[in-house]
Image (spheres, rainbow, N blue to C red):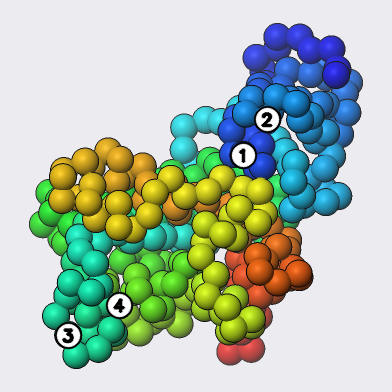
């Protein structure tokens, strides 16, 4: 353990990906490098986390991300490229909806709320440490189906973000989230959005033949897991428990955003890891730019 002094100008937040808690505020002396700092985790009091683990063995059971003292949520400049990570909650179960097929039933679902993050593309391409920092600093936006104060549609802000994003990241977005949203967007606009989608669920399923639950992937990689599930979210909506619903939806988005920043992903049920180009946002973004360069 290093000696520390209370120097607020040098405070750095230490974030434990193993259990997603804020470990401490690092105030280590200025001549110590990050690799020489060590901090204990609040929730795993017997564990100690050397900060150089991040660069050498991510993802590992004990990972620490060092984040500078956080200002108010980052606001992207108008000309800064970004990636959207999003998730949707609905008012009903698929099985309760009319329709001759599952696909039609999904399209007939109504949104309760949705949440999204805009992550700077530059941070994503700068490596896992910068990408994870961007995830923690990014401003979360949550929109409600029954709130439209400006009269432009309840999901105007998300659709505008889709228009401008380089990549749109979701988990089963092609099979669920986007079809639910179809009714709120003109077809030609939706088509343009779909070509930007990086669906982590679909990518892993197509490579392995397994339908992985997001929660199981988070557990396998020692990351913070989901706080509820879709059925409970539907119940919360029916009962008017919006604070809990909002927290759940936002937590899902941030958990997915953290996961896609990992350089590799341990997969449950099979003894292997998926490389970043299968699931990761950095590879998806690089592929998008490589494709654009072929056109130009």
- 73 vs 94: above or below: above
Give the quadrant of residue 268.
Answer: bottom right
Cα distance in 3D space between marks 2 and 1: 8 Å
Residue occupying image coordinates x 86% and y 17% = 2
Nearer the observer: mark 4 or 2; the answer is 2
Residue 65: horizontal and vertical position, in percent? Answer: 70, 39
Q: Check contact, mark 2 vs mark 1: CB within 8 A.
A: yes
Q: Which residue is mark 3?
A: 99
The x and y percentages for residue 39 are 76, 25
In the picture of the structure, the residue carrying the numbered disc 1 is: 19
Front in this rendered view, residue 76 or 149: 149
Task: Say whether marks 3 and 4 touch (CB < 8 Å).
Answer: no
Give me the disc on residue 179: 4
Q: Earlier in the sequence, mark 4 or mark 2?
A: 2
- At 14% from the left edge and 80% from the top edge, which residue is drawn? 98
Asked whether residue 18 is in view, the answer is yes
Q: For the C terminus, give its image quadrant.
A: bottom right
Vertical placement of residue 230 versus 201, above or below: above
Q: Which residue is mark 2?
A: 44
Above or below, 22 against 136 in this view is above
Q: Are marks 2 and 3 in contact (CB under 8 Å)?
A: no
Say which residue appears at 88% left-offset and 23% top-offset: 32
Q: Residue at 16% across / 43% down in the picture?
A: 240
């Amino acid at each position: 353990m290093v000696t520390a002094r209370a120097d607020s100008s040098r405070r750095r937040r230490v974030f434990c990906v193993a259990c997603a808690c804020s470990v401490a505020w690092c105030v280590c002396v200025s001549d110590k490098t990050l690799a020489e700092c060590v901090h204990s985790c609040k929730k795993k009091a017997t564990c100690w986390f050397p900060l150089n683990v991040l660069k050498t063995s991510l993802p590992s059971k004990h990972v620490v991300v060092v984040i500078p003292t956080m200002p108010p949520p980052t606001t992207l400049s108008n000309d800064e490229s970004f990636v959207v990570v999003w998730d949707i909650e609905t008012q009903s179960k698929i099985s309760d909806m009319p329709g001759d097929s599952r696909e039609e039933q999904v399209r007939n679902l109504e949104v309760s709320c949705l949440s999204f993050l805009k992550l700077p593309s530059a941070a994503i391409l700068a490596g896992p440490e910068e990408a994870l920092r961007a995830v923690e600093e990014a401003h979360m936006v949550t929109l409600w189906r029954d709130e439209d104060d400006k009269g432009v549609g309840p999901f105007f802000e998300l659709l505008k973000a889709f228009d401008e994003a380089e990549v749109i990241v979701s988990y089963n977005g092609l099979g669920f989230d986007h079809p639910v949203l179809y009714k709120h967007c003109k077809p030609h606009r939706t088509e343009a959005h779909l070509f930007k989608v990086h669906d982590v669920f679909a990518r892993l399923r197509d490579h392995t033949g397994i339908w992985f639950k997001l929660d199981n992937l988070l557990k396998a990689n020692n990351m913070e897991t989901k706080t509820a599930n879709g059925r409970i979210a539907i119940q919360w909506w029916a009962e008017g428990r919006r604070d809990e619903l909002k927290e759940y939806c936002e937590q899902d988005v941030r958990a997915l955003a953290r996961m896609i920043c990992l350089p590799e992903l341990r997969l449950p049920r099979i003894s292997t890891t998926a490389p970043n180009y299968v699931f990761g946002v950095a590879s998806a973004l690089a592929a998008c730019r490589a494709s654009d360069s072929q056109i130009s």
